[in-house]
Image (cartoon, rainbow, N blue to C red):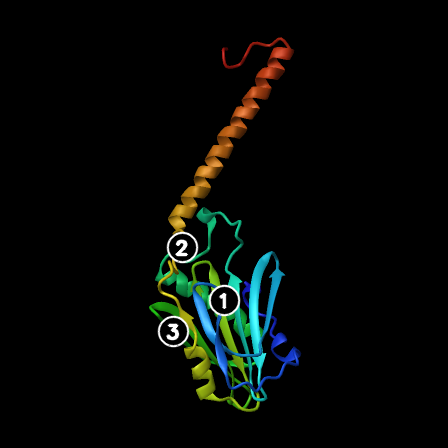
């Protein structure tokens, strides 16, 4: 799951500086878009075979990162998928994401709040520093097979209005075919595993019987199946 989170130091490692007051719409794909300044940085990386597409920009008071991460390997069999299959399993996966984020973000998680955007469920997380001052905020949504995550960070001037403006600019295109429940329930996955092992067991038994028959034929012994 660590691959679902950005390398946090990236927030503070780049030297881009933007004072643009004008903004434009940036589309991750046909599903998610948000407002960005005229100057921003875009990158694609591959971590453990998983694609991560990221944009980021910085002003004199805050850093912002938005990223799209493939939630699971594209080659993963649907029958063994860990994608959520209902609301409860969606929250379970979200809690795993939050647990990793708490481990990697160098601040204290103050609140975690379920949020909805265009009818889709996500989470908003607020972090504080040692003196209980707001420093970091994140919001994420799992849509189809991708996790879209948005990060705002400021050690010196955390502006709630700017945060609200940035996060409110995130749009989900409901004209597209979108689902948060593309996985299979445990009973389906267990049935698939049992059926697979049963089939393999039959194949193994058949191979063993075949070699026994070949061996007995070569040694002149009667076929044990006819004894």
Residue contact at pointers 3 and 2, CB within 8 angstroms:
no
Which residue position holds label 1?
Answer: 28
Relative to 115, say whether 215 is above or below. above
**Distance CA(mark 1)–CA(mark 3):** 23 Å
| Residue 120 percent location from the top left of the image | 36, 67
Local SS, label 2: loop
Residue behind mark 3? 114
State which quarter of the image contains the N terminus: bottom right
Task: Determine if residue 105 is in view.
Answer: no
Q: CA distance from mark 3 to mark 2?
A: 20 Å
**Viewer can see residue 13:** yes
Secondary structure under the numbered disc 3 in the rendered image: strand
Query: Can you give x and y, in whole percent of width and height, for residue 226 in the image?
Result: 49, 11
The residue under label 2 is 182
Circle 1 or circle 2, nearest the eye: 1
Reply above or below: 215 against 101.
above
Residue at x 45% of width, y 48% of height = 78
The percent coordinates of residue 127 (x first, y second) are 50, 82
Q: Earlier in the sequence, mark 1 or mark 2?
A: 1
Mark 1, mark 3: which one is toward the viewer?
Answer: 1
């Amino acid at each position: 799951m660590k691959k679902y989170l950005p390398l946090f130091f990236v927030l503070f490692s780049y030297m881009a500086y933007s004072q643009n007051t004008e903004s434009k719409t940036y589309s991750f794909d046909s599903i998610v878009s948000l407002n960005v300044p005229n100057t921003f940085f875009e990158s694609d990386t591959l971590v453990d075979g998983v694609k991560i597409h990221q944009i980021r920009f910085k002003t004199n008071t805050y850093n912002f990162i938005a990223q799209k991460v493939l939630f699971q390997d594209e080659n993963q069999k649907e029958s063994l998928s860990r994608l959520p299959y209902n609301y409860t399993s969606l929250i379970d996966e979200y809690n795993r994401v939050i647990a990793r984020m708490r481990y990697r973000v160098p601040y204290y998680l103050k609140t975690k709040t379920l949020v909805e955007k265009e009818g889709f469920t996500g989470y908003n997380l607020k972090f504080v520093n040692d003196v209980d001052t707001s420093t970091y905020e994140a919001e994420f949504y799992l849509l189809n097979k991708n996790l879209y995550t948005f990060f705002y960070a400021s050690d010196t001037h955390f502006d709630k209005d700017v945060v609200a403006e940035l996060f409110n600019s995130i749009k989900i295109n409901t004209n597209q075919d979108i689902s948060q429940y593309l996985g299979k329930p445990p009973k389906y996955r267990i049935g698939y595993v049992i059926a697979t092992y049963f089939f393999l067991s039959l194949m193994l038994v058949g191979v063993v019987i075949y070699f026994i028959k070949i061996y007995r034929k070569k040694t002149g012994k009667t076929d044990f199946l006819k004894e």
